Amino acid sequence: MADLLSREYEVNYSHVDNRGIAKPSFLWNIMQDAATVHAEALHLGPAELRILWVLSRMRATLLRPLLPYERIRCETWCPGIRGASWYRCFAFFANEKLVGEAQSMWVTLDPQTHRILRPSGFPAAADYLHTARGALFDPLPKLSCASVKPHHVHPVLYSDLDVNNHVNNVRVVELISDALDLQRQPGFISELQVNYTAETTFGEQLALLCGTVGAARYVRGEADGKPHFEALATLSPLERQVS
């Protein structure tokens, strides 16, 4: 089994925002695809294990904005397992130059009850560990903000849902981008961490709340007063273009 998967993706027109750079959701989209393909190659796919893969936490960093029609090579590998979490890393290259990286934590759920199934319950976890490479990074931290203000309320509709019948992790990043008012920001998101704390389903009313933590922007999505996701974003000057 391959311990590393490498796939190439194009930043096409639908991925570009009003400022002419790739939306933050582009990275989440290609990471979701690469992780899914690699899991299948490792015989850890949902159909084979009869489980649901759910993203728990993800943090990505970019050295510069990604531009229209650039071809981005995404590499992904598994550094190991800790507790109930399966860890996964990513690296992004443009013209063979490193332009970003990401770390993520995933959990497996029972498809009927949606309860967490620990890796220790799967013989396949031994193969996952056998193919592990690189150092196991520290767990991605919890996120919080002392003061937040309401931004808008988003009703969950058909276009938000994925095959697991909840709001997809990529769609969550798009909602976070809306709450950050990226259409009028002078910078690009150079670092973004998203913690997914609860499933969000059709018909729920998601309230988006925003605040600041030091130099970073905080966004929380909640329904009926219960947090469903939290994010912390750092913006850097748009002048960081291709050298």
Image: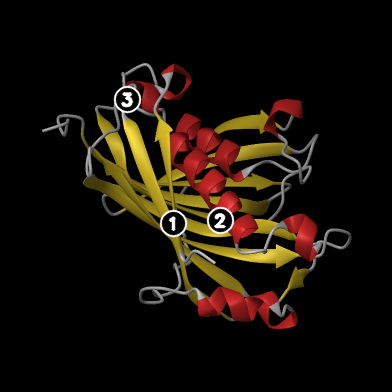
Q: In this image, 133 relative to 84: left or right?
A: left
From the viewer's perspective, tell me whether residue 198 is left or right of residue 1.
right
Residue at numbered disc 1: 76
With respect to residue 59, does 49 lie above or below?
below
1 or 2: tag closer to the N-terminus: 2
Q: Secondary structure at mark 2?
A: helix
Q: Residue at x 79, y 67 (%)?
A: 115
Badge nearest the viewer, 2 or 3: 2
**Farthest residue in the front direction?**
1
Inspect this view and state whether residue 146 appears. Answer: no
- The reply to whether dot 1 and dot 2 touch (C-beta < 8 Å) is yes
Q: Residues within 10 Å of mark 1 (few under 14, many from 20)?
A: many
The residue that appears at 67% across and 63% down in the rendered structure is 43
Write down the residue under mark 3: 21
Q: Is residue 160 left or right of residue 150?
A: right
User: Which residue type carries mark 3?
Assistant: Ile
Image x and y of residue 136, in percent: 41, 76
Amino acid type for the residue under numbered disc 2: His
For this rendering, which residue is in front, 60 or 67? Answer: 67
Distance from disc 1 to disc 2, alpha carbons, whole Å, reads 8 Å
Residue 199, percent from left and from top:
72, 51
User: Is residue 142 among the parts visible in the rendering?
Assistant: yes
Residue 235, percent from left and from top: 28, 40
The quarter in which the N terminus is drawn is bottom right
Residue behind mark 2:
38
Q: Is residue 119 above or below residue 37?
A: below
- Horizontal and vertical percent position of residue 28: 49, 43
Taking the image as shown, residue 6 lies to the left or right of residue 108, namely: left
Q: CA distance from mark 2 to mark 3?
A: 27 Å
Instruction: Select label 3 or label 1 by which is in front.
Output: 1
